[in-house]
Image (cartoon, helix red, strand yellow):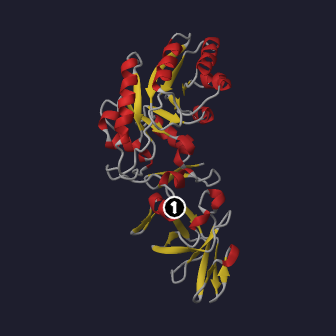
Amino acid sequence: MFAGIELIAVVKANAYGAGAPAFARELDGGGADRFAVVWVAEGTALRAAGVTRPILVLGHSFPEDAPEAVRAGLTLTCHSLELGEALSREAVAQDRPVAVHVKVDTGLHRFGLPIDAAVELATALRSLPGIEVEGLTTHMANADEEDDSFAETQHALFAEAVARLPWIPYRHTANSATALRREPLRYDAVRVGLALHGVLPPNTPGPELRPVLALRARLGRVADVAPGEGVSYGLTWRAAQPSRVGLVPVGYADGWRRNLGNTGSVLLNGHRCPMVGRVCMDQFLVDVTGVAGAAEGSLVTLLGRDGADRITADDVASQAGTISWDILSSLQARLPRLYARGGLVESIA
């Protein structure tokens, strides 16, 4: 992605809805240098799926996570000496050295340690048997805001930590937006999540990307609705004329937002069809009046392209009052995932 800089592929939250095992396996041999998740369980699931490259756990871990983490060869973000000592004991017991990263809180105040505490912890971890303090990291607070100038304040603090811990060889600070907007913050590696999935963060210039994920369903039913009749719970939409509505078997239990009712839209046979009535747990309705060929089994696009039109995660996020990360990562596991190459489905999960 950037010459001489490692790519850490962020595949947390089931690879932003794409399905982490298959997505990571593809990247394991296709350009990613490392992977990043948030919880130990996500890391062990990748190992079970056959991922062999280093896996960094970005989030909080407990000392009792140490046996499993060491066994799976995971790299934890270590926030306490207690966790470090638990990892050290397991590294010695399993005869398997373990790498850790230390996170500096430079202003996000979410996870990590103030600079003095981070330096103190890194120095203490360095003396523990079986422990390699491999990495130093932080996270930007407003990377995708129009004004991301607070990154300069954060960078100054991180640069101080780097200067005080020159023996730590691997530094990383940049997510997708920071990697694309602020070259000095790329350091040794960039943590790319959203952009890796073909979506640029807001306010972020970059190459034209092609989303890797589309969401489609088949109509389960098409029915006539007379003028004045309502549909779905609460009858919040009523037909103003003789209408036809199609049933889309995707609902809020699948991650399709309830507040998209009477607001969102889908694509059907090249037409944009409005969602009507409330989104239910397992399904919602769309107005297919006048769409030639709309029938049970017709293919509907919720995310993706149909003919000349396209619905993006940003489009849906705008309608739902949220962000594209939220839309993608909310897609639930019960949605079947079809993995295609060159237009041909290779596997289904």
Crowd around label 1: few <14 · some 14–19 · many ≥20 (10 Å): few
Q: Residue at x 56, y 66 (%)?
A: 260
Q: Is residue 333 left or right of residue 23?
A: right
The residue under label 1 is: 321
Residue 127, placed above or below residue 118? above
* Total numbered badges shown on the rendered structure: 1
User: Does residue 52 appear anywhere in the picture?
Assistant: no
Residue 118, placed above or below residue 323? above
User: Does residue 309 appear anywhere in the picture?
Assistant: yes
> Horizontal and vertical percent for residue 318?
47, 62
> Horizontal and vertical percent for residue 104?
47, 28
Residue 335, placed above or below residue 298? above
Q: Residue at x 56, y 40 (%)?
A: 21
> Horizontal and vertical percent for residue 221?
65, 74
**Residue nearest the viewer, comparing 223 with 157:** 157
Q: Is residue 73 left or right of residue 343?
A: right
Q: Quadrant of the N terminus?
A: top left
Q: Secondary structure at mark 1?
A: loop
**Residue nearest the viewer, comparing 8 with 152:** 152
Residue 206, placed above or below residue 9? below
The quarter of the displayed image where residue 30 is located = top left
> Horizontal and vertical percent for residue 32?
43, 35
Q: Which amino acid type is marked by label 1?
A: Gly
The quarter of the displayed image where residue 184 is located = top left
**Residue nearest the viewer, comparing 263 with 19:** 263
